[in-house]
Image (cartoon, rainbow, N blue to C red):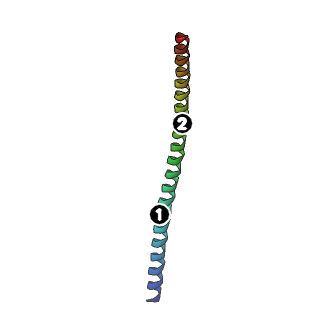
Amino acid sequence: MDKVARLRRKKDQQKASACRQKVLRRWWEKRSINRDVTTQQSKNFEKRKGRRAEREAEQNFLNEEFNAMVMAERE
């Protein structure tokens, strides 16, 4: 009887260990995916910021050029 209980306990411990390993693996995968997504979002944000700055610089240049033309016509 004692041997059966020991075997059952050992089997239960192995099941619990396997279950814990699965849970830990799932958590690790989730963290890994979140890190990848965050990195990609940061890259995309920097790209958007750069494009926005380029557009604003171009618009400012065109505005200054237009203002200079208007001022030249007024004179």
- Which amino acid is tagged 2? Lys
Quadrant in the rendering for residue 50: top right
Tell me the quarter of the image containing the N terminus.
bottom left
Q: Residue at x 49, y 51 (%)?
A: 33
Of circles 2 and 1, the one toward us is 2
Quadrant in the rendering for residue 5: bottom left
Frontmost residue, 49 versus 29: 49
Q: Is residue 25 above or below residue 71?
A: below
Frontmost residue, 2 versus 27: 27
Residue at disc 1, secondary structure? helix
Q: Residue at x 51, y 56 (%)?
A: 31
Query: How far from the left and from the top, in percent, is residue 49?
Result: 54, 36
- Which amino acid is tagged 1? Lys
Query: How far from the left and from the top, in percent, is residue 17?
Result: 49, 70
Q: Residue at x 54, y 40 (%)?
A: 43
**Dot 1: within a 10 Å radius of its alpha carbon, few (fewer than 14), some, or many (20 or more) residues?**
few
Query: How far from the left and from the top, in percent, is residue 41?
Result: 50, 43
Q: Which residue is mark 2?
A: 49
Which mark is on residue 39?
Answer: none
Residue at disc 2, secondary structure? helix
Q: Which residue is mark 1?
A: 22
Q: Residue at x 53, y 29 (%)?
A: 56
**Dot 2: within a 10 Å radius of its alpha carbon, few (fewer than 14), some, or many (20 or more) residues?**
few
Mark closest to the chain's N terminus, 2 or 1? 1
Query: How far from the left and from the top, in percent, is residue 63?
Result: 52, 22
Q: Is residue 11 above or below residue 62?
A: below
Q: Is residue 34 above or below residue 61?
A: below
The residues bearing labels 2 and 1 have C-alpha atoms spaced at a distance of 40 Å
Tell me the quarter of the image containing the C terminus.
top right
